[in-house]
Amino acid sequence: MLYAILAYHVEAEVMSWTAEEDAAVMANLRQAHDRIRQKGRFGPAARLGDTAKGRTLRGPGKGVVIDGPFAETKEQLLGFYILDLPDEEAAIEAVRELRRANPGAVYELRPIRLFLPGDQISEAEAVDAS
């Protein structure tokens, strides 16, 4: 079963981290990724850019592109994971592994109904695109 894990955090807090603090959190998360990878298939993952650079398309017809996203919460969606795990129990354990690596984050777990893997994009290409 495929699961999406959506990672939320207080964006202002994350953006206030020094380069060293950010690197430490990312190192902890990479260790968590390795532990999850050993237990199942670790799929695509992405760390999203600033919400200030985000845009939302909404409305009828062609729609209107507006600044966004806008949410009635302090936490913003800052990244996501796709994992292929045998059941919800294994997915919950994976979420707990991520939480141990980044205890300030909030993680939402959702089963995936449709998965389109798309083209393989290297990490370097993804970083350059931001």
Image: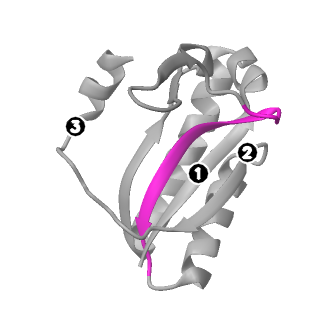
Nearer the observer, 24 or 68: 68
Q: Provide the residue designation for mark 2.
A: 105
Q: Provide the residue designation for mark 1.
A: 6
> Residue placed at 74% from the left, 16% from the top?
16
Relative to 75, 95 lies left or right: left
**Vertically, is 109 above or below 93?**
above
- How far apart, in angstroms, are the residues tagged by discs 1 and 3? 20 Å
Report the amino acid beneath label 2: Ala
The quarter of the picture where residue 19 lies is top right
> Residue placed at 35% from the left, 22% from the top?
127
Residue 91 position in % (x across, y down): 56, 74
Q: Magenta span has 62?
A: no
Residue 45 position in % (x across, y down): 42, 47
Q: Residues within 10 Å of mark 2 (few under 14, many from 20)?
A: some
Q: Secondary structure at mark 1?
A: strand
Lower position in the chain sequence, tag 2 or tag 1: 1
Lower position in the chain sequence, tag 1 or tag 3: 1
Lower position in the chain sequence, tag 2 or tag 3: 2
> Residue placed at 32% from the left, 18% from the top?
129
Specify the label residue 121 is tagged with.
3
Magenta part of the protein: which range? 71-85
Report the amino acid beneath label 1: Leu
Q: Are marks 2 and 1 in contact (CB under 8 Å)?
A: no
- How far apart, in angstroms, are the residues tagged by discs 2 and 1? 10 Å
Q: Secondary structure at mark 3?
A: loop
Q: Residues within 10 Å of mark 1 (few under 14, many from 20)?
A: some
> Residue placed at 78% from the left, 24% from the top?
13
Nearer the observer, 75 or 83: 75
- How far apart, in angstroms, are the residues tagged by discs 2 and 3? 26 Å
